[in-house]
Amino acid sequence: MSNSAASYTIRRLEQQLGAKLFNRTTRSVSLTEAGSAFLTRIQPLMEQLDLAFNEVGRESSGTMGTLRLNMLRSAISLVITPILKDFLRAYPDIKLDVISENSLVDIASRGYDAGIRYDNVMAQDMVAVPIVTDMRFCIVASPDYLRDRTVPTHPRDLLKHECINYRSASTKAVYRWEFEKGDEKFSMAVTGRVATNDNDLLLQAALDGLGFGYLQYRLVEPHLDAGRLVNVLDGWTPGGTLYLYYYNPGRIPRKLRVFIDFVRERLK
């Protein structure tokens, strides 16, 4: 700015505030007490404004920023935990903000870049991308629960047992367990004393001997190896897919594009 433009702007600001901000002499210009206090108050705000301009500028120029993800709690251990360190090391310009919610949320209105869920039933303006296509589920129970009980050899045998149900927080519906073997394919409602939308609680209930649980294999594998859980009806549970979905206003941000590519390469 020219000296005259700066002087005009300062005079306008002093008129607006009703306070003198500078002491002016023929030899020097210095802040008044009011000017010094005003500068102290606005300096953090100006820094935040500069930061906002820089972040938007990076986004528009195709560089990185903060990637905000909303996903199931179980998906965090399946997707984020295995790749977190290496992804942040590979892309130092990306910040990762991950929130876990089991119910389906409107990611666009909530300010998320993407969500991760087990199905691709999304709104019409959402794009679903498969990121883990070899999901394996299994039916497990603790040795304590199986003691003195008949081990199921067919899914319908589960109707005689306690089962731990998964209940959707958004629809309140209980998930029907899915089975597939050869030409036989069906879903079935099971019963039990415990229902939850939290996979950690579902797993703990199975470990505590409260019945059978229908869980993702990678989550229970350490407990199977340690003998804390027993896998039954192996070969009856169909595979599944974990999807990343995002709102498609015209183009995908580069930070999300590199995340999708990285996850699909590492978890394939």
Image (cartoon, helix red, strand yellow):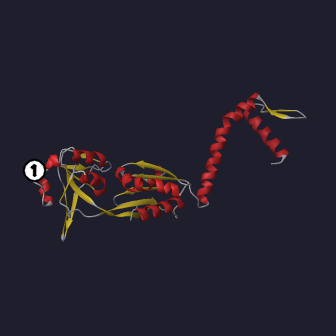
Residue 10, located in which quarter of the rendered image? top right
Picture quadrant of residue 43: top right
User: Measured from the top left, where is residue 17 in percent x and y?
Assistant: 73, 33
Secondary element at image label 1: loop
Tell whether 77 sits left or right of 24: left
Q: Position of residue 18 (x, y in %)?
A: 75, 31
Q: Is residue 251 left or right of residue 220?
A: right
User: Residue farthest to the right?
Assistant: 26
Q: In x, y percent, where is residue 138?
A: 24, 58
8 or 161: which is nearer to us? 161
- State the residue in front, 73 or 267: 267
The quadrant in which the C terminus is found is bottom left
Viewer can see residue 33: yes
Is 76 rendered above or below residue 21? below
Q: Quadrant of residue 38?
A: top right
Locate residue 108 relative to residue 160 in the image: left or right: right
> Which residue is located at x 60 percent, y 59 percent?
60
Residue 232's spot in the image, x, y percent?
18, 57
Question: Is residue 162 visible to the viewer in this orientation of the structure?
Answer: no
Query: Residue at image x 67%, y 37%?
Result: 42
From the image, tell me which residue sits under label 1: 149
Residue at image position (48%, 60%) is: 259
- Is 184 left, or right, of 34 in this rendering? left
Crowding around mark 1 (Cα neighbors within 10 Å: few <14, some 14 to 19, many 20+) is few
| Residue type pointed to by label 1 | Arg
143 w.r.t. 249: above or below:
above
